[in-house]
Image (cartoon, rainbow, N blue to C red):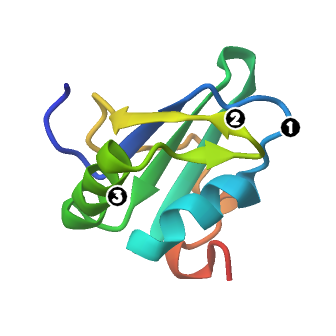
Amino acid sequence: MAEPSKVIHVRNVGHEISENDLLQLFQPFGVITKLVMLRAKNQALLQMQDVPSAINALQFYTNVQPTIRGRNVYVQFSSHQELTTMDQNSQARGDEVGN
C-alpha cells in the first residue's frame, strides 16, 4: 500500500457511477477538495482536505466494502500526495464541492 496521502485512488468506477455518487461516499469523512474521474480506466482520484480525513475513510472502508449502485469499488491511497490541474479556474473551490 502507498504511504498515507490526502489523495484516494478509487478503482472499478463504472460508467454508471457519477461524481456525486463518489462525493456521497467520502463526504462523511471530511471536505473533498478535488475529484478527477478517469473514465477510460474506470478509476477516480479524489483529494481530501487533509491526510487524517483520508486515513479515516480508508480505515472505515477496510472493514466495510464500499459499493456504489450495486458495484464494489476499491479504495487505496494514491501515490500522489496532491492533485494539480492545468487550469485552476475550472475547479470548484474545496468548500463548494458537493454543497
Dot 3 falls on a residue whose secondary structure is: helix
User: How many other residues sit within 10 Å of disc 3, few (<14), some (14-19) or many (≥20)?
Assistant: many
The residue at the point 17 percent across, 43 percent down is: 4
Toward which corner of the image does residue 17 lie, by quadrant? Answer: top right
Residue 73 image label: none
Q: Amino acid at mark 3?
A: Ala
Closer to the observer: label 2 or label 3? 2
Q: Amino acid at mark 1?
A: Glu
Q: Position of residue 77 (x, y in %)?
A: 30, 37
Residue type, label 2: Arg
- Secondary structure of the residue carrying tag 1 is loop
Most foreground residue, 72 or 89: 72
Which residue is depicted at the point 63% across and 66% down? 24
Whether tag 2 and tag 1 are in contact, CB under 8 A, the answer is: yes
Measure the alpha-carbon separation of dots 3 and 1.
22 Å
Q: Which mark is residue 16?
A: 1
Q: Would you name the residue on which mark 3 appears? A: 57
Percent position of residue 86, x then y: 57, 40
Task: Quote the CA–CA distance across marks 2 and 3.
Answer: 18 Å
